[in-house]
DNA sequence: ACAAGGCGTTCCACCATACTGAACACTTAT
DNA sequence: ATAAGTGTTCAGTATGGTGGAACGCCTTGT
């Protein structure tokens, strides 16, 4: 549904629109798709044939689906992030230490992207999945990144995406956010108090590379009733910060 | 590098060629890419701009990379496979029971695709990754699938991809393969005796749906010295077969 | 059984548009 | 300073993507 924004190569834009539509519809036939993306059947058919020949799409019993070739692409794309390679096992350890959810995040095109996630058997079951893209201002992970981005880039992102109110606690005021980012820079720790999901609190720390620019962030998240007092304000922040530092060290001599 | 096969929409084929090239080069600049795919700089630039606008490509410090949007696509694509949803936890359990590597495979465009993989702390460290596509005749997982495909489709696949000799043990004779597939059908178990990787043996079972058509396979793999005698010929096959049956049952009432 | 509507597919003519090559800034190396 | 590399822009041309209509097939309803 990113249709209206044009300006590039039409055929390519349309191809990706079709891929996305296929995913949103959980697989579909030509007519259904054509109707969904608002293009003539023949055009859609032409695209599907091309995508199938290139093995990015599979047809099974009369219905088209996106293929697992995307899995291949995404795995190599993910492995190109040094952050993923280094921090993955640290996230797992964080889960063992805390029993909660831990996640790794990076920023792309002004939005937060979950690059890896792990959770203990007793941890909360939240909806977020790897690869999901969420507004950057409403998570601890996002704010940790935002705080350490160069100012111009930070403004650019906020201008482009705004500060939509996701829950009642979401910070949607620019001034308030600026202040909070200031404290995050001081403490190297960001909090999320049900700002994206009701009932979910989290603690995150930024991860900086050798040149002091943010390349991502790491967090621990859990249900509000377990995230309180000493644990929420002192213990978890210290643990997360420690792990973040370990990751930073590992990254610098690689 | 799938360039020569044409016949579809040129712009789309080229866009995906560029995406694949970006992955193979671990990120690249316009000129390097143009040279690699054999197209004029301006054309490549045009494609990259389009892909970046659509957020499938990211540029950072003068170099282009494939973005994690592919992660988003592939995650939903993978979740559309009922096999993945159901069998994932069974693979994990198989790892706990055996301490070896366990994997889940499906077939796409005549090749084997690893859909999920897990391994114990003491298990062999092999190169195969999720999303990888390998010839279908040289793994236990692939043969388990191949054996239960309709005959016409089986021939079609062999005609298209041949039977390349990957290791000294790979079955590259059509007759021999046909016989082995016959026994696989009888026993519901397939073996791989260093047919894809030297030193690696594995045992796999097909997974059939309600209508008796294969939708994938599941395996246990380990270093040859640990995969021998009773364990290799009786214990592991029984375990794998048991798990496969559990998965089949779970799939049928979903 | 036959019609009616659904589907995916094929065809072809037209004109939008993707491609190209050259010229343009710009940074980095010599 | 010069040169060689980079990414970017531009405009003309012919390529080839587009989309309407027609086709054949299978399913549905009566």
Image (spheres, coloured by chain):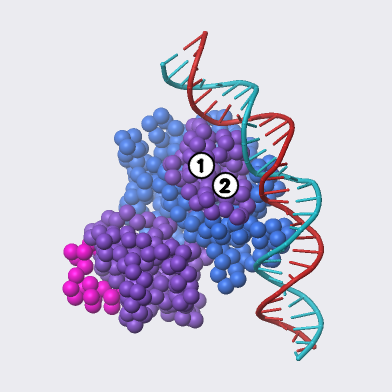
Chain colours: A blue, B purple, C cyan, D red
Q: Residue B240: within the magenta? A: yes
Q: Is residue A222 visible?
A: no
Mark 1 vs 2: CB contact within 8 A:
yes
Q: Which residues are magenta?
A: B222-241
Q: Estimate how packed mark 1 is, as few (under 14), some (14 to 19) or many (20 or more) residues with alpha carbons within 10 Å.
A: some
Q: Estimate how packed mark 2 is, as few (under 14), some (14 to 19) or many (20 or more) residues with alpha carbons within 10 Å.
A: many
Q: Position of residue A34 (x, y in %)?
A: 69, 61
Of marks 1 and 2, which one's residue comes earlier in the chain? 2
- Above or below: residue A107 compared with residue B31: below
| Count of numbered circles in the view | 2
Q: Is residue A3 visible?
A: yes
- The numbered dot on residue B14 is 2
- The numbered dot on residue A38 is none
Q: Nearer the viewer, residue B231 or A138?
A: B231
**Left or right of A186 on screen, residue C16:** right
- Asked which secondary structure carries label 2, the reply is helix
Q: What residue did someone put label 1 on?
A: B37
- Above or below: residue B57 compared with residue C29: below
- Above or below: residue A240 compared with residue A253: below
Locate the C terminus of chain A by quadrant: top left
Tell me which secondary structure the magenta stretch mostly adopts: helix
Q: Nearer the viewer, residue A72 or A103?
A: A72
**Left or right of B248 on screen, residue D26:** right
Q: Compute the Cα span from label 1 to label 2.
A: 9 Å
Instruction: Have a look at marks 1 and 2 and say if they share a chain.
Output: yes
* Residue plotted at (48% across, 48% down): B1
């Amino acid at each position: 549904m990113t249709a209206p924004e044009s300006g590039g190569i039409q055929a390519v834009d349309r191809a990706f629109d079709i891929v996305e539509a296929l995913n949103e519809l959980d697989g579909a036939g030509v007519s259904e798709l054509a109707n969904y993306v608002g293009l003539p059947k023949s055009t859609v058919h032409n695209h599907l044939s091309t995508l199938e020949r290139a093995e990015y799409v599979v047809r099974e019993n009369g219905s088209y689906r996106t293929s697992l070739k995307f899995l291949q692409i995404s795995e190599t794309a993910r492995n190109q992030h040094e952050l993923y390679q280094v921090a993955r096992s640290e996230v797992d350890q964080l889960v063992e230490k805390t029993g909660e959810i831990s996640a790794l995040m990076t920023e792309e095109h002004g939005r937060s992207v979950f690059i890896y996630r792990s959770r203990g058997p007793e941890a909360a079951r939240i909806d977020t999945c790897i690869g999901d893209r969420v507004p950057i201002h409403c998570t601890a992970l996002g704010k940790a990144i935002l705080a350490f981005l160069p100012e111009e880039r930070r403004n650019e992102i906020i201008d482009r995406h705004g500060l939509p109110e996701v829950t009642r606690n979401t910070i949607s005021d620019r001034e308030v956010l600026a202040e909070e980012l200031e404290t995050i820079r001081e403490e190297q720790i960001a909090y999320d108090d049900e700002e994206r999901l009701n009932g979910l609190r989290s603690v995150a720390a930024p991860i900086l590379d050798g040149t002091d620019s943010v390349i991502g962030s790491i967090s621990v998240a859990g249900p509000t009733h377990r995230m309180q007092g000493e644990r929420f304000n002192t213990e978890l922040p210290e643990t997360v910060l420690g792990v973040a530092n370990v990751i930073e060290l590992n990254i610098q001599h690689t």
